Image (cartoon, rainbow, N blue to C red):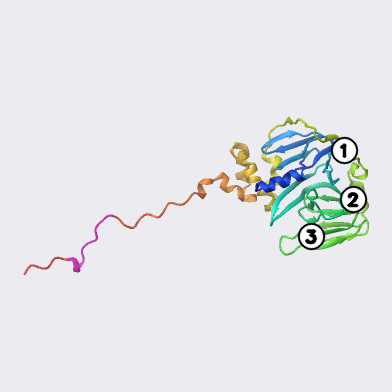
């Protein structure tokens, strides 16, 4: 069964689009089946694909993908991984985040100075890791999150629904795990179970291949249209993530099956309510006038004078 590795870049202004183009990466290594979501289309991805704003990529359980940027910033994803690359303009700055809903990821950041336009923070539902030089391996499930600082120090933040995030420092070789309702713990080495579960490609030093694909155009084949079930995890993600899909997939709400599923799960994504039931948000009619058109009954002051 195919699970989703999802990339999504949502931009609200033209300046955001320009920023996204500067940060787009190229799929340089791809093993296994991969699907690309572009707008409301779903396509078959191939090596050499240059990711653009709003792209979504999905891989099969046994798939592996390596995405390279021109500055030697590399993101790798293991099997059964859902991830979203989010680029937006916030408070005058470009926000660049790899949001991993679930699955395996490895980031190699060869930058030696401040983060530039092609480096990304790592964010999962439980934690966030700002971009920094080094190599970081991470895994996210529906309940847990783990991070291993393979090379370089890491300053991560435990995300919290309420209150400020908790800052935690990892040094090279240290391991962090967050479980439900419990603050994460730090170990001086990764446990054996983590090492045994590492995707095979994460154990290797893979070559950089971006030069091979410079200037090359690749063709993508159409894949079957996606259903509500295909994107349900994203439609039910945290609000700041899922809201961007309302306009992107708005046309899908006109498909009977997709619309029915949206309505059935509306409590999980209430932002779709104005799309599904726009009549509820129309301006209300003004209240009827109190003037009934009937002349008032003359009072004593209006009575004609009595005849003498």
Task: Please name which of the two marks, 1 or 2, marks the residue nearer to the observer.
Answer: 1
CA gap, disc 1 and disc 2: 28 Å
In the displayed structure, does residue 218 sit left or right of residue 300? right
For marks 2 and 3 on the same chain, the one whose residue lies earlier in the sequence: 3
Seen at 68% across and 48% down, the residue is 15
The answer, for residue 238, to whether it is visible in the render is no
Per the rendered image, the range of residues in magenta is 293-302
Helix, strand or loop at label 3? It is strand
Residue at which label 2 appears: 194
Helix, strand or loop at label 2? It is helix
Q: Do the residues labelled 2 and 3 touch (CB within 8 Å)?
A: no
Crowding near the residue tagged with mark 2, few <14, some 14–19, many ≥20 C-alpha atoms within 10 Å:
some
* Nearest to the observer: residue 227 or residue 48: 48
For marks 1 and 2 on the same chain, the one whose residue lies earlier in the sequence: 2
Position in image of residue 33 (x %, y %): 80, 34
Task: Please name which of the two marks, 2 or 3, marks the residue nearer to the observer.
Answer: 3
Residue at which label 3 appears: 158
Q: Is residue 295 magenta?
A: yes
In the displayed structure, does residue 196 sit left or right of residue 125? right
């Amino acid at each position: 069964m195919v699970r989703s590795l999802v990339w999504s870049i949502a931009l609200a202004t033209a300046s955001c689009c320009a920023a996204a183009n500067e940060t787009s990466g190229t799929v340089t290594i791809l093993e296994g089946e991969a699907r690309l979501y572009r707008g409301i289309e779903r396509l078959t991805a191939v090596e050499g694909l240059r990711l653009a704003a709003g792209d979504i990529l999905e891989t099969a359980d046994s798939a592996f993908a390596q995405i390279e940027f021109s500055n030697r910033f590399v993101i790798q994803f293991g099997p059964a991984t859902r991830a979203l690359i989010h680029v937006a303009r916030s408070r005058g700055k470009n926000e660049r985040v790899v949001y991993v809903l679930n699955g395996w990821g490895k980031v190699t950041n060869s930058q030696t100075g401040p983060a530039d336009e092609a480096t990304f923070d790592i964010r999962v539902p439980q934690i966030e890791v700002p971009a920094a030089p080094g190599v970081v391996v991470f895994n996210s499930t529906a309940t847990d999150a783990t991070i291993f600082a393979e090379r370089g120090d890491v300053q991560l933040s435990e995300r919290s629904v309420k209150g400020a995030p908790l800052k935690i420092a990892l040094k090279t070789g240290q391991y962090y795990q967050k479980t439900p309702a419990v603050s994460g713990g730090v170990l001086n080495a990764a446990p054996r179970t983590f090492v045994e579960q590492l995707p095979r490609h994460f154990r290797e030093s893979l070559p950089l291949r971006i030069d091979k694909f410079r200037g090359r155009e690749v063709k993508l084949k159409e894949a079957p249209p996606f259903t509500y079930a295909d994107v349900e995890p994203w439609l039910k993600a945290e609000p700041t993530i899922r809201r961007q899909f309302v306009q992107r997939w708005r046309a899908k709400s006109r498909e009977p099956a997709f619309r029915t599923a949206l309505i059935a799960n509306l409590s999980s994504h209430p932002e779709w309510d104005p799309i599904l039931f726009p009549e509820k948000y129309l301006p209300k009619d003004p209240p009827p006038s109190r003037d009934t058109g009937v002349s008032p009954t003359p009072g004593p002051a209006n009575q004609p004078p009595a005849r003498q």
